Amino acid sequence: MASVAPTDASTIKAFIACVGTKLWGQRMECISREAARSQRVGRALAQQHAIEITIERLRRHAQTPVTPAERCVMRLAREAVLTDRALSPQGRIRFRTALAAAMVHEKTLVPLFHLLRTASLQRSRGFTVHFAGFEDEASFDLLLTRDGAEAEIVCDVISAEDGRDVHRGAWVQLVDGIDADLQTWLSNHPGRYLLKLTLPLGLNGDEAPRVALQERIRTMLASQRRSDFDEACVLRLDPLMLAAAQMSDGRAEPGLLSSLRQEFGHQAHLALASGNGGLFVLAARAGREDEVAVAIRRRMAALAPARLTGTRPGILAMFVEDTDRTEWRHLRDKLELEGEARQFLTHPEARTVVAVTCASRLELMGIGAPDAASDGELRFRNPAHPAAKTAGLAPAVLSSL
C-alpha cells in the first residue's frame, strides 16, 4: 500500500484552506463531541461524516498507508482544489459558499463530492465540463460538450430514508435511549432475548413518537410483560433461539449480525445489547415494504421541470445516500431502480431528460466491488428523447444494463 505523498498532504491542506481552517476545526470538534455521546451514535456519525473524518485523518497522519477509500477521497479533495483554482472569482465565491454550507448542522460533503465526481467521470469519457451552477448561477449544475453535442446535468442527493417508514437515524436514537434499560434487564435476567417490533405507523425523526415508544418498551420490561400492541406498534419479547447467537468474553460473536440479517431480511432494523454474559437483540420492521426506488422516481419527477432548462438534453445524476451494501445490491438485483427509472422516463415530466444515472457511496468511495456499478454509476437512457442516439452524448447516456 502506498503512503500519502507530500503532494497529497499539500492537497489536503489546500482543501481545508478552501473550506476555511477555523470552520474546519469547528466542524471536527462538533463531530467529535456528538460522537462521544455513545458508541451507537459514534458509529452512525462515522458513517454519515465518513468523508470529513477521512480528510481529517489524512491531515493528521499524512505519511501513513492509505486505503482505496481514502485514495478516492483524496482524489475528490484534489478535484475540489483544482476546481476552486479554475473558477472565475464569482464562481469561486459560490463554490466556497457551498463548501461552508456543508459544514453546518447535519449537512455533509457528499453532495459536493458527488458533483465533483460526476464532473470527473464525464471528463474521463471525453466531455468538456463547465460548472454552470457555480459560474453562471444556472439552475442545473454541469454543462457537457462533446463533438458538437451538449447536455445539462443536475446532480442531486436523495436519502434512502425518504422511502422508509422506519428511519435508521430514528432507530439509532430509539435504541440508544433504552440502552440502560436493556442492561438492567440483562443484569436481572441473564440469557438471550429477542424483542421484535412491528411499526405500522413507522418511526421517523419526530421526537414525540420515539419517546412514547421508548416509554412503552421500558414499561414492558419493568413489568416483565412479553407482549404489547396497538395501532402504532406490536412488541413481542421472546427467547432468542438463533443458533448463531453465541457469546465470547461477554460480546456477541462477529457472525451474529449477518445471521440476524439473513433471518429478518435486509429491510429489518437490528440492534444488539450485551451484558452479564447475556444478549438482547432488537429487530424492527415497518408495516409495509420500503419504497426507496419509488422515492427516487418521485424526486426526479420534481427535479426535471424545476432545474432543467429544456433547451438541451438533460441528465439527472442521482446519488442515493443512507443505503448500505446489502440494500444497494437488492435495489439493483431486483431491478427496482431500473423499473422506477424507466417508468419515470415515460412520464411527461421526463420529456427533457435523455438519461438518468444512480450512484451510492459504494461508487463514490470505491469500496463497493463486487456490489458497486462497474462503470461508476447505473445509467438508464430515455429512448424516446430526440438526442438519445446522438453519438457525441453516447458515453454519458447509453444504458449500463
Image: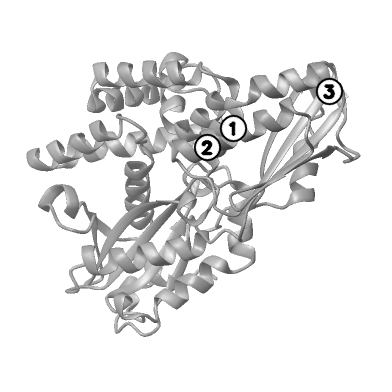
- The 10 Å Cα crowd at callout 2, few under 14, some 14 to 19, many 20 or more, is many
Spot occupied by residue 177 in the image (x, y as percentages of width and height) = 57, 26
N-term mark: 2 or 3: 2
Image spot of residue 274 (x, y percent)? 76, 23
Q: Quadrant of the C terminus?
A: bottom right
Mark 2 — residue?
Answer: 210
Seen in the picture, residue 400 relative to 98 is either above or below; the reply is below
60 and 109: which is toward the camera? 109
Give the x, y percent position of residue 379.
Answer: 46, 66
Q: What residue sits 59% from the left and 26% below the top?
A: 176
User: Is 119 on the left-hand or right-hand side of 205?
Assistant: left
Q: Amino acid at mark 1?
A: Gln
The residue depicted at 20 percent of the width and 51 percent of the height is 131
**Visible in this render: residue 197?**
no
How far apart in space, not on screen, are marks 2 and 1 (Cα)?
6 Å
Q: Quadrant of residue 185?
A: top right
Q: Position of residue 349 (x, y in %)?
A: 30, 75
Amino acid found under the numbered disc labelled 3: Gly
On screen, residue 86 above or below 384: above
The residue where tag 1 is placed is 214
Q: Is residue 334 left or right of residue 48?
A: right
Disc 1 versus disc 3: nearer the observer: 1
User: In the rendered image, which quarter is residue 95 located in?
Assistant: top left
Q: Where is mark 3, residue-wise?
A: 278
